[in-house]
Amino acid sequence: MKKILITGGAGFLGSHLCDRFIEENYKVIAIDNLSTGSVKNIEHLNKKSNFEFYEHDVTKFIHVVGNLDYILHFASPASPIDYLKMPIQTMKVGSLGTLNCLGLAKEKKARILIASTSEVYGDPLVHPQTEEYWGNVNPIGPRGVYDEAKRFQEALTMAYRNYHQLETRIVRIFNTFGPRMRLNDGRVLPAFIGQALKGKPLTAFGDGNQTRSFTYVDDLIEGIFRLLHSEYANPVNIGNPQEVTINEFAQEILQLTRSSSSITYQTLPIDDPKQRKPDISLAKKLLDWQPQFSRAQGLKITIESFKPELIPKK
Ligand code: UDP
């Protein structure tokens, strides 16, 4: 049985990764400091004999008994309001946390995959974003704590690869959604769904003409699974290239939730990227991967998953 360590294992993406690797019959060790993750996301795995969870902060030394085949480093606050609330922790988990994970991978001769992000492209001047693009990040703006931590993480990972010949993989994740996102994490998708189902106005930021491209979580997990088992060490974009403006997205949510809420406009956050869409030619070629879920299919599943929390039973 292959053994895998998943940091951020109680988070949104981490918990879906735990599910996938348990299903594939790996021995899964999840660690999480529960700053944004929740044990609720993994409680269904407690009865599995091949699953273990430890509450631990990866910015502190990580000790794992015995061998380890793989590490997935997914610990980090990841929504703008979370990393604005925890700027130093965000920088520490991307730097010290990554250092600890890479050191552990070296010690155990394990292959490590690092969760990077489309935020390394900042407010992109190249559209759609290819992996060759170096990005347009403001290091001292409010988003800089996340963007620069992730850029540092990529550089550190490549240094370990080049200097220690470590087996490394880097996935650049674009906006992903699905069940287990926190309704109050401040991101547009849970915000709009929550507002629509409660009959409150949808809060679009700026003029709503900025774009994003939303990936359903199962597609992302499949891409990560394939990348981990591939032989490619440079960063790979995983995301759904179906691009949409925030205004169009608001209309789509209203329609799918059958809500008659209005849309209100609020100030655009500083350095909010104006457009974002992945070029996924590399993932197609290398991994034979492309999204299988349309945005509407993913949204229907996600809306249903939020309903019990939003519409309590009488
Ligand atoms: N956004 C919005 N209303 C909200 C939350 C976010 O219009 O209540 C906008 C935000 O300004 C951004 C887009 O939606 O342009 C996506 O924001 P999110 O925080 O989900 O992700 P990110 O900016 O990291 O892509």
Image (tube, rainbow, N blue to C red):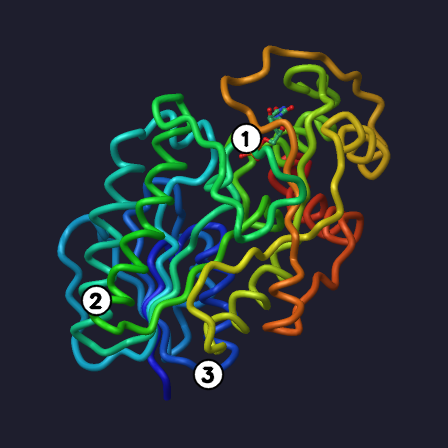
Query: Which residue corresponds to mark 1?
Result: 123
| Callout 2 secondary element | helix
Q: Where does the image place residue 86, in percent across and percent down from the top left?
A: 31, 30
| Callout 1 secondary element | loop
Say which mark, if any, is on residue 25: 3
Q: Earlier in the sequence, mark 1 or mark 3?
A: 3
Q: What amino acid does circle 1 point to?
A: Asp
Q: Where does the image place residue 180, in percent across and percent down from the top left?
A: 54, 49
| Residue drawn at x 49%, y 38% as measured from the top left | 135
Residue 96 lies left or right of residue 202; in this view the side is left
| Residue drawn at x 61%, y 65% as measured from the top left | 283
Query: Which residue corresponds to mark 2?
Result: 163
State how far apart marks 2 and 3 are (Cα): 33 Å
Residue 32 lies left or right of residue 253; in this view the side is left
Residue closest to the eye, 52 or 207: 207
Q: Quadrant of ligand 1?
A: top right
State how far apart marks 1 and 3 are (Cα): 40 Å
Q: Earlier in the sequence, mark 2 or mark 3?
A: 3
Mark 3 crowd level (few <14, some 14–19, many ≥20, 10 Å Cα) = some
Q: Where does the image place residue 298, in percent across and percent down from the top left?
A: 73, 52
Mark 1 or 2, closer to the camera: 2
Does 209 appear above or below 289?
A: above
Residue closest to the eye, 200 or 7: 7
Residue 252 lies left or right of residue 281; in this view the side is right
Image quarter (top left, top right, bottom left or bottom right) of the C terminus = top right
Does 6 appear above or below 129?
A: below
